[in-house]
Image (tube, rainbow, N blue to C red):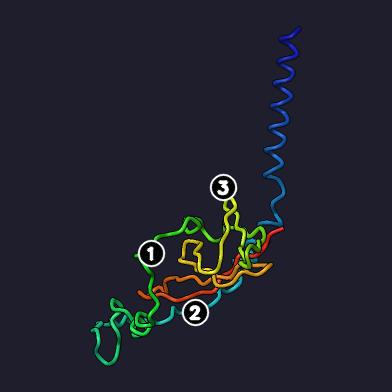
Amino acid sequence: MMKASLNILKVTVAAFALAGLTACGADMDDLDTYINEIKAKPGGRIEPLPEITPYESFTYIADVDGVRSPFRPDTPQAASSTSGITIDTSRVKEHLETFPLDTLRMVGTLNMNETAYGLVQTSDGLIHRVIPGNYMGQNDGRITEISDSEIKLVEIISDGIGGYVERDAAVGLTD
């Protein structure tokens, strides 16, 4: 009994497959007509390729006709290196100079004996007292002013061409 139903199933699947294949090839007259119409139309004109101009080579000769060598610094370096801004390498670094400036937080101020101290918290959670003249941050940041809302400092950073420039920075009071 099982063998008979299996044979019937095989015959049914074969019949559907045969019907599906015959449906794919039937009535393609409209497609053939369309293809013949397209082939009967005249072909279009193809534009010619643009003319290719030959490559003109350039021989670089330094310092001729006022052209600067790309391997020598430009003239502004002389001005920036003579600006007089230098880093004091003989100065002993303070503890807060080991921390990047953006990781330091001002947490308050303290007035003792008519001296205003800024309270700075480091990323390790310790709080340090600072006064104008102390250094903090990794760019030789010297503290210039302490107010109730921020600590102002001047950093010395590289100008990118061999010299240094001063940049104002501040660490604001955090809530």
Against 126, is 41 above or below? below
Q: Badge 1: few (under 14), some or many (20 or more) residues near its Cα, within 10 Å? A: few
Q: Which of 11 and 33 is in front in this view?
A: 11
When the figure is inspected, residue 133 is found, relative to residue 16, above or below; the finding is below
Q: Which of marks 3 and 1 is in front?
A: 1
Residue that carries the numbered disc 1 in the rendered image: 91
- Quick one: SS at disc 3? loop
**CB atoms at circles 2 and 3 under 8 Å apart?**
no
Residue 132 lies in quadrant: bottom right
Contact? badges 2 and 1 (CB < 8 Å): no
Task: Tell me the number on the disc at residue 47.
Answer: 2
Spatial CA span between label 3 and label 1: 25 Å
According to the picture, the residue beneath numbered tag 3 turns out to be 124
Point out the tag, 2 or 1, that comes first from the N-terminus: 2
Task: Look at label 1 and name its amino acid.
Answer: Arg
Q: Residue at x 64, y 62 (%)?
A: 112
Relative placement, left or right, of 149 versus 61 is: right
- The answer to whether the residue labelled 3 contacts the one labelled 1, judged by CB atoms less than 8 Å apart, is no
Q: What residue type is labelled 2?
A: Glu
